[in-house]
Image: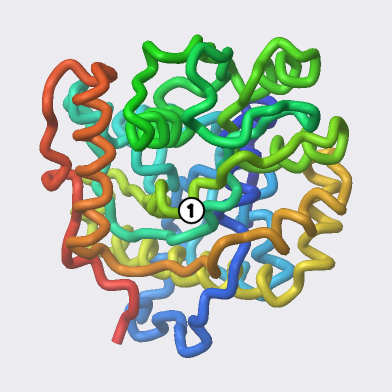
Amino acid sequence: MKQHFAPGQLDRRGFLMAGAVTLGALGLSTLGFAPRAFAQGKSLSELTLGVATYRGQDSYFFEDAGTADTPYKVEYAEFAGGNLIVEALASGSLDVGGMSEIPPIFSLQSHRQPRLIAVLQGDVNNQVFLVPNESSVESIGQLRGKRVGYVRSTTSHYFLIKALKEQGLTMNDITAVALTPQDGFSAFQSGQLDAWVIYGVFIQLAKFRSGARVLKTALGYLSGNYLIAARPKALEDPLRRQAIQDYIQREARTLEWINDNPEPWATKSARLLGVDKAVFLDMHNQRSQPSKIIAVSEQAIASQQEVADLFFDAGVLSERLDVSPLWERNFPLLAL
């Protein structure tokens, strides 16, 4: 039996993952589950897998996709952000969860690192610079001296630094305002921001409610990589490791169903998140690429290293960090 526990209200990561993780054609029609890996069904039936989720994420659609019949129990816990998932993995209260490239980087400084076992490549058009509809700003370079909202230590922060750097600017050349997504939305709607770097469903809300204009998307700036992380001790247990592998396969199949069924997905997402269905259909239609779960690669590791290096160069990190120890390079996604 699956249980969802919700310690907090929906916030930035819930919206982000609803937009970034649950969209896209996976092209995984040959991906199957692993019956041979679960020959000892009795043992698996006694195992409970702790999985992090976000409101409206793919875990809410397992029944719809026909992937809910796990040979082990699943206990879900909703989280507000990837940094909290990292902490829960480190404490032993979770086995597996998803996040952007950024939270594991900061875990290196606390020596509470998860193991990164797979990559979900998703949409990057769901992260943008927004400006008011009447704004005269037509380029990132014209933001010099302007009030720009962003979300600290997230992909929003990274996108802002990288886009400014491309124009020969730094955070010191703008009036950077670190805000939560909810506070940023209020500030943007009330005219207190000249631009807002934000992600997920907030983009559509600002577009639909105030006619906000997209100045630039993150296409070409962000990798679109969302990382699947596991508790190191869980991977040392062969049975639990197999359950994690199976769960990721089911997640991939669920995402495939979502892509093939945008109408029912949008309808259910609207009910779960309390947002109009049109918002989710727009997210689906505006995506930059299909989503797919892929194995760890040197390219994925290099992408996360680029994020860490940029944060160090910008003074967000106090030391230059090597991300390679975070990664489990030989975690199989397909069982034979």
Visible in this render: residue 70?
Answer: yes
For residue 179, what is the image quadrant?
top right
Depth order, front residue of 127/147? 147
> Residue at coordinates 19% horizontally, 30% vertically from top-left?
108
> Residue at coordinates 57% horizontally, 19% vertically from top-left?
149
Q: Is residue 84 above or below residue 146?
A: below
Left or right of 258? Residue 176 is left
> Residue at coordinates 50% horizontally, 32% vertically from top-left?
140
> Residue at coordinates 59% horizontally, 33% vertically from top-left?
198
Judge the density around disc 1: few (<14), some (14-19), many (≥20) Cα neighbours within 10 Å.
some
Residue 301 x, y percent position in the rendering: 21, 53
Left or right of 242? Residue 78 is right
Depth order, front residue of 32/305? 305
Residue 61 x, y percent position in the rendering: 69, 61
Residue, disc 1: 219
Q: Is residue 54 above or below residue 40?
A: above
Q: Is residue 120 above or below residue 222?
A: below
Depth order, front residue of 86/128? 128
Kind of residue at disc 1: Leu
Left or right of 194? Residue 272 is right
- Secondary-structure class at tag 1: loop
Residue 300 x, y percent position in the rendering: 26, 57
